[in-house]
Amino acid sequence: MMKKIAILCLGIVMVSGLHAERVVPVSYGSFETWTVRHIKESKVIGGKMRTLYVVAPTDTIEGNIPYTYGKKGNPWSMSDAYAVVAGIHKAAGTVFPEKRGDGTCCRMDVKMMEVVVMGFINIHVLVNGTIFWGKTIEPIRTANDPYQNIDFGVPFTQTPKYLQFDYKCRVSPDQWIWRATGTSPTKKIKGHDECEAYLLLQKRWEDADGNIHALRVGTAYERYGEDQLTWVNDHRIEVLYGDITDHPSYKPYMGFNRPCRAMNSKGKIVPIREEGWAPQGTKPTHAILMLTSGCYDAFLGHDGNAFWIDNVKLVYEE
């Protein structure tokens, strides 16, 4: 009898070993350290002191100084940005550290920014709170094309099984969103804004003209369309590899429709041309991890939505 029990236990250990996991925290993905930036806005728009935050080592930066993302292997950038447009200094903050237990988490808000010029409110801009892997090139010089200053993604050659994190969210049930660009009248349009999280693994290459091409190697993608006001811990999104259009969880927004750009070897920000699904077994060269309080492109969304994230990790099969 004891021999049978021993054999059974050995079998359980062997089967468990076939599914062993390795859970790897993402750099600075615990959100316990932040760099604080104090930016003085121009007098013509009120001259207030604004605070911006960076997911980065603990530090404080005083003055209107462009931040250099990607320092010391830190993969994160965010929607908080310092802009100098037509000589006017402006700071926009939609990402914040927030207390959680004995530590901190990351909070991202969808906000309608009001710009007061000479004492009158005459400009409204809708901004989604977002953190992502990549770099924002500061200062922002124009609001006409918000993606021209963003280098999306970081070098990455691994093949994780899951993206894992803790989260909660506040999502309006309204079936309309704001369109507020700052250059045209603000208006409501049909739509439902949702928080979203995704990890895109790509195999990229650059042609002789500096264009960046890519195949999609792996996709982990979810949207959150209703309130989840208590923490969901260790939530996992499976990374699906190859062509996923026949997978039961596939949605059209998981395809090649993101307005992502990257810096080429000539130092120019250009579109990433995703041209198809990579064959199974292809190793990625880059990854884009995005966590955001709104699922629409720039200047579109629902003011008041919020997304809280903590303990971002990648899970690998051993």
Image: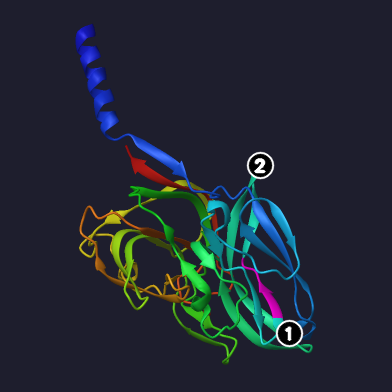
Describe residue 119's horizontal placement relative to residue 14 as left or right.
right
Residue 79 location, quadrant: bottom right
Magenta stretch: give its range.
89-94
Instruction: Tell me what residue is drawn at x 70 percent, y 54 percent.
Output: 59
Q: Note whether residue 253 is visible.
A: yes
Instruction: Tell me what residue is drawn at x 32 percent, y 67 percent.
Output: 205
Q: Residue furthest bottom?
A: 184
Residue at image mark 1: 116
Instruction: Tell me what residue is drawn at x 41 percent, y 57 percent.
Output: 155
Is the residue marked by circle 1 packed among few (<14), some (14-19), or many (20+) residues within 10 Å? some
Describe residue 223's horizontal placement relative to residue 254 as left or right.
right
Q: Secondary structure at mark 1?
A: strand
Q: Position of residue 159 (x, y in %)?
A: 33, 49
Residue at image mark 2: 102
Residue 28 drawn above or below residue 46: above
Q: Position of residue 33 (x, y in %)?
A: 64, 49
